[in-house]
Image (spheres, coloured by chain):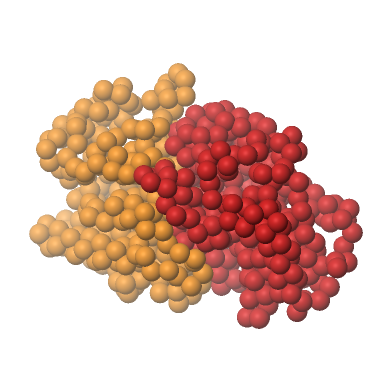
Chain colours: A orange, B red
Amino acid sequence: MTGIQPSDFVKRLDKTAEDTEVLLGKLLSDEVLSDEIFRPKRLIEAMRYSSLNGGKRLRPFLVVESAAVFGVARQSALLAGAALECIHCYSLIHDDLPAMDNSDLRRGRPTLHKAYDDATAILAGDALLTIAFDIITRDEIHPEAGVRLALTRALARASGVGGMAGGQILDLAGEGRFGDREPVDVARLQQMKTGALLRFGCIAGAILGKGSQKECQALDDYGRALGEAFQIADDLLDVEGDAAALGKQTGQDAALGKTTFVTQLGIEGARQRVRDLLAKGDSALSIFGNRADVLRAAARFVAERKN
Amino acid sequence: MTGIQPSDFVKRLDKTAEDTEVLLGKLLSDEVLSDEIFRPKRLIEAMRYSSLNGGKRLRPFLVVESAAVFGVARQSALLAGAALECIHCYSLIHDDLPAMDNSDLRRGRPTLHKAYDDATAILAGDALLTIAFDIITRDEIHPEAGVRLALTRALARASGVGGMAGGQILDLAGEGRFGDREPVDVARLQQMKTGALLRFGCIAGAILGKGSQKECQALDDYGRALGEAFQIADDLLDVEGDAAALGKQTGQDAALGKTTFVTQLGIEGARQRVRDLLAKGDSALSIFGNRADVLRAAARFVAERKN
């Protein structure tokens, strides 16, 4: 199906994670930019605590690999990916707060508000969200201001009230946090909460590569399919996964009585839906031929991951 | 000194506040943009609660009037001002949270987390911060993408770790929120916490108007002087002001044992410093002749305000 060996895929994924780590380490430094006054140590340290040493860096990987389809310079894509990762990291900090999901652990370490305090965590989240829009505008991302501007706007829309932040409030409403449990449209909620940033990762490459309308649409379709497959895999892992491999408790959705893809479709139905989504993603990518082999493998990786 | 009558100045200020209100009402609507999925009602309502019916709109006014120096179309400047106001409103929401200043009232109404809840307030703040970067990139702001991009980056830097968010953490550190009270450099703290956004308001006009380097520098110098005068006036009002006119308790800084311009300079020293800053602002604006009369009046208004 795909021309990429699983071991080669994992090497590529790891390499982008490493490069992203190095880049974020530089961007989130105490270096004071020309029009900044000063970068307070405590805030920078808190931002670094929650952004470095972190995860698979799937979102930057999608930016890098969707950009590679168009032959975009890797360094440009890494920078756009770092901006996206800052948004992802901010969202985890705020989601973990006592007022939100009240989580004490993240990736086996104390969450930021546990390691520091709530005020620092709120501000570090705010500052990571803000710095994403500094990073995404940088000249090194693309010589044309119009391209950087299109990326900036797409990132804002993926992250805001009509994207990730909106998805988070729908999720809380579905848990009954604002009164009675509100009915949940799982597909819409997850398109917003987790899908919007993953989808941005996929279309970012097309924006950077100045793809045709057809090519942009293809990556958008692929990104939507991948985003939904990601979430269904997440819901399946919460039911069937190995807590040790996941690094977090399973059965959380059931404990909260949450509506998920699994409660809606059943385990078999959810698995079938993932297969359908993989086929949909492959079909969207067909116009790119073997230039999209890594993206095809990425969808499989996301759908079949064990953590 | 200035060619603008006080009553004319107030009319201009009020007109921009009205126009900003109308514009924010449209921007923060349930209209779903092309690349958004849906705008959840609760989140939009919370964003509106904290952004509409609000204040003097001094920051948008500075954008509009600094842009007017260059003959920039009012509608463009209002849009950039609305983006800036979204940042200002988000910062008030997050500052009011129990984990931060724990304020129950703002402009005589319950703060957002009191009217709704903490989770909604965190998310509404996040979404206002994010939508600012959607608004500031819009085509209607300026035909050239490079100009919009420069504005976007300047807004991100004014708001982030090296600007407003950084200033807020220095303020909390000075109150002893993270252990022992940390020594406070009031001028630096306030340049970041309140000064950075006011200064952005002043340079935004120069960016929109494609001012020369000298003109940009002049508005930057003016913006710094105005920002500091604003804060000293604030510190003086906390000591000498009328709680009824202010709509909030006075003596708060003393109660918290905060280091302010007044504790550092004394009341007379602070008043003298304001006079020096007004002279500095006038001097910076001299290259614009009478085109900057409204900005000169704005500095006086800020320095002499009673609330």
Image coordinates for residue A95, horizontal then vertical, percent: 36, 39
Which residue lies at the image location 59% right of the left edge and 39% below the top edge? B252
Percent coordinates x, y for residue A72 in the rendering: 34, 72
Q: Quadrant of the N terminus of chain A?
A: bottom left
Examine the rendered structure and indicate whether residue A47 appears above or below residue A109: below
Q: Residue at x 58, y 43 (%)?
A: B253
Task: Judge by depth and name the residue closer to the eye, A235 or B58.
Answer: B58
- Using the rendered image of the protein, determine whether residue B55 is visible from the camera's viewpoint: yes
Q: Residue at the top extreme?
A: A180
What residue do we see at 19% from left, 31% from top? Answer: A250
Quadrant in the picture for residue A77: bottom left
- Does B258 sit above or below residue A183? below
Q: Quadrant of residue A187?
A: top left
Classify the position of the C terminus of chain A by image quarter: top left
Residue B140 as seen in the image, left or right of residue A242:
right
Instruction: Answer with left or right where residue B65 lies relative to residue A81.
Output: right
Q: Using the image as rendered, state which of residue A244 and residue B238 is in the foreground.
A: B238
Q: Position of residue B82 (x, y in %)?
A: 65, 53
Residue A210 seen anywhere in this rendered image of the structure? no
Can you tell which quarter of the image residue A41 is in?
bottom left
Q: Is residue B204 left or right of residue A19?
A: right
Taking the spot 80% from the left edge, 49% from the top edge, the residue there is: B14
Q: Nearer the viewer, residue A109 or B25?
A: A109
What is the x, y in percent for residue A200?
39, 55
Numbered-mark total: 0
